[in-house]
Image (tube, helix red, strand yellow):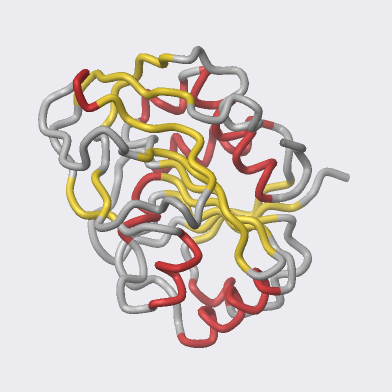
Amino acid sequence: MAPRLLVFTRTADYRHDSIPAAVAAVRALGDFTVDATEDPAALEEPLDRYAAVLFLSTSGEVLTPAGRARLAAYLEAGGGFAGVHAAACTEYDWPYYGELLGARFARHPAYQPGRALVEDPGHPAVRHLPAVWEFTDEWYDFRANPRPAARVLLRADESSYDGGGMGEDHPLAWCRGQGDGRVFYTALGHAAEAYENPDFLAHLRGGIGWAADTEGG
């Protein structure tokens, strides 16, 4: 049986209209048995039956105190966590979440084409990508750079779009350890069109698989 993935899409702030397409795309990857929910009570139950928990464009304060405790215990004990796009706009009031994710959203320029640069081609989230990847997204800026506490996989080429605010070292996707657990995050995935893009889907598959410890790299 395929490993189980808990996909959490609750929003308490901005809600992306791409969420249904994103959930459908994760199901269609076929790598996991997917349980998708918006119910915070799902995070209050034991999570060890899941290979990973995916926060898919969540926003705002989406967890109960019990859910926070469960998620932290799950990660510290070796669970997997993946965050996509607005997952960085989530749980601002919970310091541990900022630590596990590695950085928090600050702002973004207009949705526009740009270039992402592969920094760590050995990782399964990026090893299929060209060294310079043309993509269209919101090119999130973060309140702090996740380096050096994270392994940066992709960074933005701010010369390729208007309005970047982090400079030459602008991480877009990274992974890190949290306790005995694994965390992957990608800032990409704003629009429904992303979830029809084969390169982006392979990026997701590799990142989620790495977090779930079903992919090497």
Q: Quadrant of residue 192?
A: top left
Residue at horizontal 66 percent and vertical 49 percent from the top: 211
Quadrant for the N terminus, please. Answer: top right
User: Looking at this view, is 149 or 62 the one in front?
Assistant: 149
Q: Quadrant of residue 21?
A: top left
Whether residue 128 is situated above or below residue 146 in the rendered picture:
above
Quadrant for the C terminus, please. Answer: top right
Residue at horizontal 19 percent and vertical 21 percent from the top: 159
Coordinates of residue 24 in the picture (x, y in percent):
54, 36
Residue at horizontal 54 percent and vertical 86 percent from the top: 66
180 lies left or right of 1 = left
Coordinates of residue 204 in the picture (x, y in percent):
56, 34
User: Looking at this view, is 170 or 135 the one in front?
Assistant: 170
Farthest residue to the bottom: give it.
65
Coordinates of residue 198 in the picture (x, y in percent):
53, 17
Whether residue 82 is situated above or below residue 49 in the rendered picture:
above
Residue at horizontal 38 percent and vertical 36 percent from the top: 188
